[in-house]
Image (tube, rainbow, N blue to C red):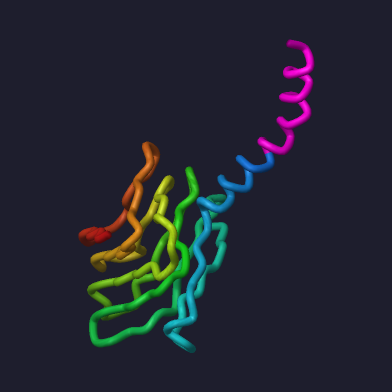
Amino acid sequence: MKPRIDQLLQASPFVLCSILAATTALGQITPDNTLDNERSVVTNLNINGIVIDLIEGGAIRESNLFHSFQDFNVAEFGRVYFANPAGVANILSRVTGANVSNILGTLGVLGNANLFLINPNGIFFGINSRLDRGGSFFGST
């Protein structure tokens, strides 16, 4: 019995590293390049001691703002907000990669625009997830 415990203890640092790597990936937002020079830009900001990821850029067409991402995830207790430029009523975000979107923290809009999140691979909202927006939220898989 002792050799198995020793093997388990030797393997545990590798398991821990794998778990930490998976947790890091869950908070990843990766814009794709389908919108060329109008692609989304993710900026990490500290506002009054609160760290958020602010999503700006995108392609504005009339009152709609389009974003396109390879991966879109919100880490547990993370905060991700879309900028809401003047005149924009709808923010449409699609995910073109092969992964589910894991929303484990706060997803919001800095304004009153409706937020659409489209991911054909699925959208998962965790127990600590929260929507913070002035408009409506629509999710489609």
Q: Position of residue 121 (x, y in %)?
A: 35, 59
User: What residue appears at the point 43 percent right and 47 percent down from the top-left corner?
Assistant: 105
Q: Position of residue 119 (x, y in %)?
A: 33, 63
Q: Is residue 13 magenta?
A: yes
Q: Quadrant of the N terminus?
A: top right
The answer to whether residue 35 is above or below residue 110 is: below
Q: Is residue 141 magenta?
A: no
User: What residue appears at the point 77 percent right and 12 percent down from the top-left corner?
Assistant: 2
Query: Where does the magenta region start and end?
Result: 1-16
Is 47 on the left-hand or right-hand side of 63?
right
Is 35 on the left-hand or right-hand side of 4?
left
Q: Residue 46 or 10: which is nearer the viewer?
A: 10
Q: Position of residue 86 (x, y in %)?
A: 31, 79
- Main SS type for the magenta part? helix
Q: Residue furthest top?
A: 1
Figure quadrant of residue 110: bottom left
